[in-house]
Amino acid sequence: MLRLARPNVMIVDDDPLVLIAVGGMLRHLNCEICTAGNGATAVEETLRRNGPQTSSESGTAKIDLIVMDANMPVMNGYDAARRIGDLHREGKISAVDIVCLSAQESELHADLCKASGMQHISINAP
């Protein structure tokens, strides 16, 4: 039987409850999870895991997908996504897809996501 590698997903949010809830859903889908509490930490972790060294040298697996909030302290999701995209264009990291998971539904928010290189998914909270 062919077994595919488990995707490595980084969840970036300053709300610990979101990290737990989204992490649980993704683990149910057989994903490996790592977390960051702000955009600056996400950039650092992406550089460490997706940089030029191989995962066997660093001891950690490359990040396949980032699920990121937009509004966080230290560095917001828009700026973090831009910086991660810059690192990829500079040849410092391998490509990684970034999805913005947010309760915001405005056209401005969707435009900001697109401009920063994130795909936008809006989740309405009850």
Image (tube, rainbow, N blue to C red):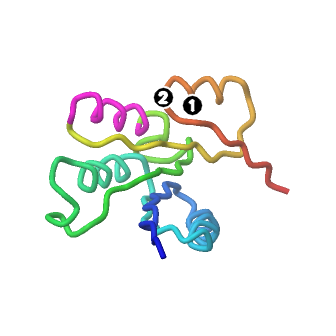
**Residue 82 picture location, percent across and down:** 40, 31
| Residue 20, above or below 112 | below
Where is residue 21, by image quadrant?
Answer: bottom right
| Residue 110, above or below 101 | above
For label 2, the crowd category at 10 Å Cα-Cα, with few meaning under 14, some 14 to 19 and many 20 or more, is some
Q: Secondary structure at mark 1?
A: helix
Q: Residue furthest right?
A: 126
**Residue 88 picture location, percent across and down:** 29, 35
Residue type indicated by callout 2 = Ser
Q: Residue at x 50, y 58 (%)?
A: 11
| Residue 110, above or below 7 | above
Marks 2,1: beta carbons within 8 A: yes
Within the magenta stretch, is there residue 101? Answer: no
Q: CA distance from mark 2 to mark 1?
A: 5 Å
Where is residue 112, by image quadrant?
Answer: top right
The residue closer to the viewer here, 121 or 79, is 121
Q: Which residue is mark 2?
A: 116
Q: Which residues are magenta?
A: 80-91
The quadrant of the image that shows the C terminus is: bottom right
Task: Give the side of residue 20 with respect to residue 126, left or right.
Answer: left
Magenta span main SS:
helix
Within the magenta stretch, is there residue 81? Answer: yes
**Residue 58 picture location, percent across and down:** 18, 64
Task: Give the side of residue 57 with respect to residue 97, left or right.
Answer: left
Q: Residue at x 26, y 48 (%)?
A: 47
Q: Of the numbered discs in the image, which one, if any, rests on residue 96?
A: none
Q: Which residue is mark 1?
A: 113
For label 1, the crowd category at 10 Å Cα-Cα, with few meaning under 14, some 14 to 19 and many 20 or more, is many
Total numbered labels: 2
